[in-house]
Amino acid sequence: MIRTLRKDISGYNEMQTLEEAQEETGWKLVHGDVFRPPSFSPMLLSVCVGTGVQIGTAFGLTMVCAIAKLVSPMKKGQTLMAVTVMYVLCGSVSGYVSSRIYKFCDEKAWKRNILATAAAFPGVLVAMFLFLDFFLAFAGTATSVWFFTIIALFLLWICVSTLVSVQRSFMFRQRRIKLPVSCPKMFVLRLLSCRSVAWSDLWEVSMVMCYLQLCGEDHHCWWNSFFNCASAGIYLFLYALWFLSTKLELVGLLPMVVYLTYMSMISLAFSLFCGSVGFLSAFMFNQLIYGALKVD
């Protein structure tokens, strides 16, 4: 991959004549469009990426606490409480990422962005809990929770999360993310080495898929870079269905509903985390490769 990029960049930069520049093909041809904001819902994209970063940061900090023996993985209640507290405290992280992406897309509704980032994912989880609680109450189980209790906890969650992330409004005062190219004109910037990219499974998949798409002269890689890795959540849910049908021996409809509800929540969180990694890695990848080009 690195050898291919070096060969492409070297070949593009050696084009000296106008005739050669007019005959250029491949990913260089879309240099004036690749950083244009997505045409479909920049708000939703920024919220998804910010929430995914928040989920990953919360789980990462929880794992650090477990390694430091501050949290015992054997105590499920303690671990769940630690993840919940870390998620709320990491609201500033999601606010920073979401606001920077939203501002990069030249959007102005920063108040809606703050509220959506704070409430979107918890709102989906609350809706799933209400759906599950309906079945539990209908079956007359002792684990069902009163409807207004769930709503009250959700409102409390939103208040705390909004207070923690109140500094998000200051993110919009920062400068727009600096790009190696301008649309449609590019400026010559310093040559960056592709070896500075940290390679991991998700990063590599996202970068390779992004490169193949750009080679096909398709610059609409914003949502594609997110879904390329977010699809791992679909695989996780399908695996949960296979495990339910082949390994588990659940009796009755209610245990299946409980299992599928919780696995849906886990799959959604995993999908958002993987999608955020894919989007951010593809974005940095584009900055590196287009910053290495010399175009007048």
Image (cartoon, helix red, strand yellow):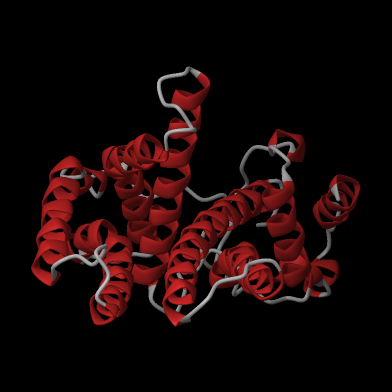
Q: Is residue 293 visible?
A: no
- Left or right of 70 in this view: 186: right
Q: Position of residue 69 (x, y in %)?
A: 46, 18
Vertically, is 291 above or below 127? Answer: above
The quarter of the image holding the C terminus is bottom right
Tell me where residue 211 sits by quadrant. bottom right
Q: Position of residue 197 (x, y in %)?
A: 69, 39
Q: Position of residue 115 (x, y in %)?
A: 19, 61
Q: Is residue 55 visible?
A: yes
Residue depicted at 51% across the width and 54% down the height = 273
Vertically, is 278 above or below 57? Answer: below
Foreground pick, 35 / 54: 54
> Residue at the top extreme?
68
Residue depicted at 61% across the width and 50% down the height = 281
Residue depicted at 34% across the width and 60% down the height = 102
- Left or right of 173 in this view: 6: right
Residue depicted at 85% across the width and 68% down the height = 20
Count of residue discs? 0
